[in-house]
Amino acid sequence: MEKRKLISLRGVLLRYLVQTALACVLAAACWLVLLLVLVGSGLCLPANWAARVSSEAAQNVLPQMTAETFDASRLDPLCRYALLAGPGSDEVLATNMDARHLQWALEDWRGTRRWHVGYAQYYMDAKLQDGTICRLQFDYAVPYADPALRGVLPDLQTAHLLLGLLLLVGVVTWCTHRTGTFLARETAKLTAAAQSVARQQLDEAVFAEARVREYDAALQALQSMGGQLTDSLQRQWTMEQQQREQIIQLSHKLKTPLTIIEGNAELLAEDALTPEQKAQVEAILQGAEQTRTYLGKIRAEVQTPLKYKTKKSSMPQ
């Protein structure tokens, strides 16, 4: 018989950890490949795109302008700008920033920058020909390539991060469910064998299908206990069977003297007896009848087959 390959509980847990780690790495790789495909397909732009267009504007476009000739249409839509009156001035001449981003830009301009929730903001300052300052604000996010999609669809980078988290949660859940199902099947085998032993139905018990070493050891212990239980039941059945046979033999031996007693009592009843003697004879006949009825019940009881008889040949190997 081919020897079964068993694994320990520690091995099951270690396999679960390794499988989960590999699955998480694979999910992360798929998540990264998806982002690269989105960038490569032109649906979205690289994370450094805003920094590139801001640098180009600060070096080549803005130095050619003044406050009066400032043309925001020559700037990329990813460039948020604030046109300041001059160095050290907080006066904002023009901006396309919302109130929050403008507040962050001015805090950084004054040197009172604080930490804020969201993408980290970076800045480039360009001096125009008339001395005014154009402060460009950008971040390293992955934007949609089409500007029309940026205000309609959810933020691409946030959605992609949420997708990554969902992938990780799904992978961990799947690995946990897979390992839990395996252990549940192994535990069910142990439970079924224990219940068969408890019901004394040893011919229905299965002791050799566990794949976990600790469970297999428990099944072997149950099998040994079941064998001892079978031997004990067999000895008990043999003893009770012998007692039944002795009772049957005794009832047969009592039948003959009981018949003689009844016959003699009936003969006495035909003679002329005093009332006291008749009462004694009737008592003898009633006692004999009760004894015969009692012996009949005993014979019927002992002739009932034993319900827990178990053959050794039916014990699983």
Image (tube, rainbow, N blue to C red):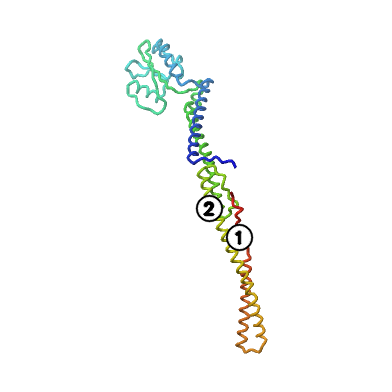
Displayed quadrant of residue 58: top left
Residue tagged 1:
307
Compared to residue 180, the image places residue 297 above or below, namely: below
The amino acid type, in three-letter code, at marker 2 is Met
Apparent side of residue 182 relative to residue 81 in the rendered image (left or right): right
Q: Quadrant of the N terminus?
A: top right
- Which of these two is toward me, 34 or 134? 34
Q: Are marks 1 and 2 in contact (CB under 8 Å)?
A: no
- Which of these two is toward me, 40 or 208? 208
Report the residue at 60% width, 57% height from top.
Answer: 310
Mark in front: 1 vs 2: 2
Report the residue at 57% width, 46% height from top.
Answer: 208
Residue 135 pos. (x, y %): 38, 17
Which numbered disc covers residue 50? none
Which element is circle 1 on? loop
- Which of these two is toward me, 99 or 311? 311
- Which of these two is toward me, 122 or 226? 226
Compared to residue 96, the image places residue 294 above or below, namely: below
Which element is circle 2 on? helix
Apparent side of residue 65 relative to residue 22 in the rendered image (left or right): left
Q: How far is the residue under mark 1 from the one under mark 2?
A: 20 Å
Q: Earlier in the sequence, mark 1 or mark 2?
A: 2
- Within-10-Å neighbours for mark 2: few <14, some 14–19, many 20+: few
Residue 184 pos. (x, y %): 53, 44
Residue 131 pos. (x, y %): 35, 12
Residue 211 pos. (x, y %): 54, 42
The amino acid type, in three-letter code, at marker 1 is Lys
Which numbered disc covers residue 225? 2
Displayed quadrant of residue 114: top left
Displayed quadrant of residue 246: bottom right
- Within-10-Å neighbours for mark 1: few <14, some 14–19, many 20+: few
